[in-house]
Image (cartoon, helix red, strand yellow):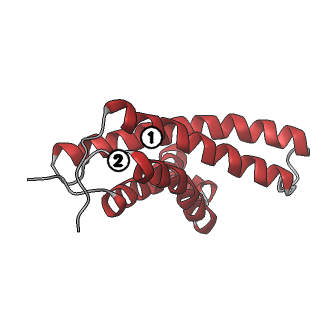
Amino acid sequence: MSERYVRPTVAGWLTPTLIAPWISVYGAVTAFAALGVDWGLFGKIAGWAVGMLIGSVWAFAFCLMLIVVDVALLAVRVRTLPAGKRGWGTALAAPLMVFGIYGVAPPHTFWHYGGWGIAAAILAPMALVALVVRVFAGQKPLR
């Protein structure tokens, strides 16, 4: 038996899209700091503070990426706006997936391509994960 479709509200879509990535990023930064992973660059507290600053910028960019992907998928009528459990779940898990890609292919290793190469190495996994997560975990629109 299929679930009854309930059209998501803008607030029901934007709330998890704008809050969950921040929670996920701050949790990851705090976990890294608690485990003492600083690669000898900073102390534990300073590493956490720098990580929170960089994580804040990254989370802002990722939220924008999610919004762009959601609106694009809605515009081509591939998926509806994710809200409720789907919205929270995908927005919480997606940043951790991107961090997993960064673990396999760290963006700083693309330094020989210049600033644009590093920017692409940061933004391409964000866009890919946002697209894949929203397509596979999203709902198809009613036709």
The single residue placed furthest to the left in the displayed view is 143
Q: Is residue 42 left or right of residue 23?
A: right
State the separation of the CA atoms marked 2 and 1: 8 Å
Q: Label 2's element?
A: loop
Q: Does residue 50 sit above or below 103 in this rendering?
A: above
Viewport quadrant of the N terminus = bottom left
Q: Is residue 138 left or right of residue 48?
A: left
Q: Which residue is mark 2?
A: 82
Q: Label 1's element?
A: helix
Residue 44: x %, y % from top left:
89, 45
Q: Amino acid at mark 1?
A: Thr
Residue 85: x %, y % from top left:
44, 51
How many dots with numbers? 2
The single residue placed furthest to the front in the displayed view is 1
Q: At 25% from the left edge and 45% from the top edge, which residue is drawn?
A: 6
Q: Residues within 10 Å of mark 1 (few under 14, many from 20)?
A: many
Q: Is residue 125 left or right of residue 136?
A: right
Q: Which residue is mark 1?
A: 17
Closer-to-camera residue (16/45): 16
Q: Does residue 14 sit above or below 116 in this rendering?
A: above
The answer to whether the residue labelled 2 contacts the one labelled 1, judged by CB atoms less than 8 Å apart, is yes
Residue 53: x %, y % from top left:
70, 34
Q: Quadrant of residue 135?
A: bottom left
Residue 26 shows up from this direction: yes
Q: Is residue 26 left or right of residue 34?
A: left
Q: At 36% from the left edge and 61% from the top edge, which residue is drawn?
A: 137
